Image (tube, grey):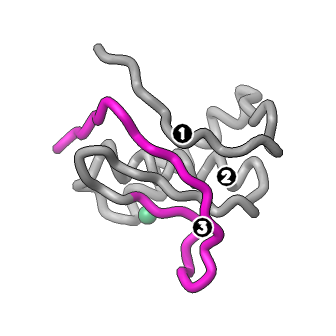
Amino acid sequence: MRVNLPKTIRLRERKMLRESAVGMAHYGKVPLIEIDPRLGQKERLATLVHELAHIVFPDLTESQTIQVEQRLASVIWKDGWRRLAPDKPFQTTAKTKQP
Ligand SMILES: [Zn+2]
């Protein structure tokens, strides 16, 4: 299975109006994740994990990606992770550490 670990993943908030989605992953040299800013914290976490899974494991089916999202987001949520400043502007770039 292909694993894609880009050094940088850009994050952007965008109200999804016409799409039936609440988040989107765009592939490329610097992948971009878009998240609808109207989501609650728990749904936002799940959506972020879901879109990250799309980028890191591009060969998974949508159904497999949903399973990854549900397992990971559930554990992260139960461990108490929340956004510290939900009203502050979304970070535009999240650089990952180099191995
Ligand atoms: Zn998806």
Residue 46 sits above or below residue 39 on the image? above
Q: Please, what secondary structure does the residue beneath circle 1 have?
A: helix
First in sequence: mark 1 or mark 3? 3
- In this rendering, which labeled residue sits more in front, label 1 or label 2? 2
The structure residue drawn at horizontal position 64% and vertical position 33%, both measured from the top left corner, is 76
- Quarter placement of the N terminus: top left
Q: Please, what secondary structure does the residue beneath circle 2 have?
A: helix
**Which numbered tag is attached to residue 44?**
2
First in sequence: mark 1 or mark 2? 2
To which quarter of the image does residue 97 belong? top left
The structure residue drawn at horizontal position 40% and vertical position 47%, both measured from the top left corner, is 53
Ligand 1 - quadrant of the structure image: bottom left
**Which numbered tag is attached to residue 72?**
1
Q: Looking at the image, which residue sits at the far left?
A: 1
Residue 71 sits above or below residue 76 on the image? below
Q: Which residue is more in the foreground, 16 or 44?
A: 16
| Label 3 environment density (alpha carbons within 10 Å; few <14, some 14–19, many ≥20) | some
Determine which residue is flagged by label 3.
22
Ligand 1 lies under 8 Å from the Cβ of mark 3: no
**8 drawn magenta:** yes
